[in-house]
Image (spheres, rainbow, N blue to C red):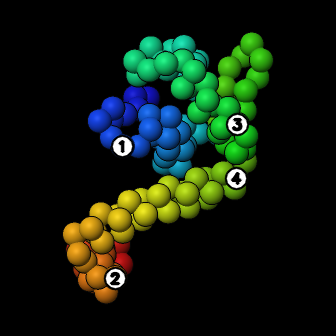
Amino acid sequence: MTFKLNSDSRIPIYIQLKEAIKLAIATGQFLAGSQLPTVRQLAVQLKINPNTVSRVYLELESEGVLSTKQGKGTFVKDHPKIDTTIKESSLNELMDDFIIKASALGFSPTELLNAIEKKMKRSGDV
């Protein structure tokens, strides 16, 4: 699993990584019980500070998403509510970003709703 982080983004790297892991879990790329790369492995792969990865793992563990077993690694927690929670959290963040950008471009709430409905009809999701 490769995570895409944007060093030019205004969003801090640790938040990008945290959301990327949550998204990977929500989309089934990491299943319950799956082992994540070690802190060092992921830091080297992403070319970021190991403390950043460690911080993300600790936060996700405190949120009940991950579980660390001393000497064995970090794993996706086996809990059915996690997928729903992660999906809702990811959707909220996507919507926040979308609304901020669309508002900055001058779109009204009605225009946004109409555009979403139109797009979903085209894709066959409605």
Q: Of 101 and 89, which appears nearest the observer?
A: 101
Q: Residues within 10 Å of mark 3 (few under 14, many from 20)?
A: some
Q: Amino acid at mark 1?
A: Arg
Alpha-carbon span between mark 1 and mark 4: 33 Å
Alpha-carbon span between mark 4 and mark 3: 16 Å
Numbered disc 1: secondary structure = loop
Q: Amino acid at mark 2?
A: Pro
Q: Residue at x 47, y 58 (%)?
A: 93
N-term mark: 1 or 2: 1
Query: For mark 4, what is the residue?
Result: 80
Numbered disc 2: secondary structure = helix
Foreground: disc 2 or disc 4: 2
N-term mark: 4 or 3: 3
Q: Residues within 10 Å of mark 4 (few under 14, many from 20)?
A: few
N-term mark: 2 or 3: 3
Query: For mark 3, what is the residue?
Result: 61
In the rendered view, tell whether residue 74 sits above or below residue 61.
Answer: above
Q: Can you give x and y, in whole percent of width and height, for residue 24 in the image?
A: 49, 41
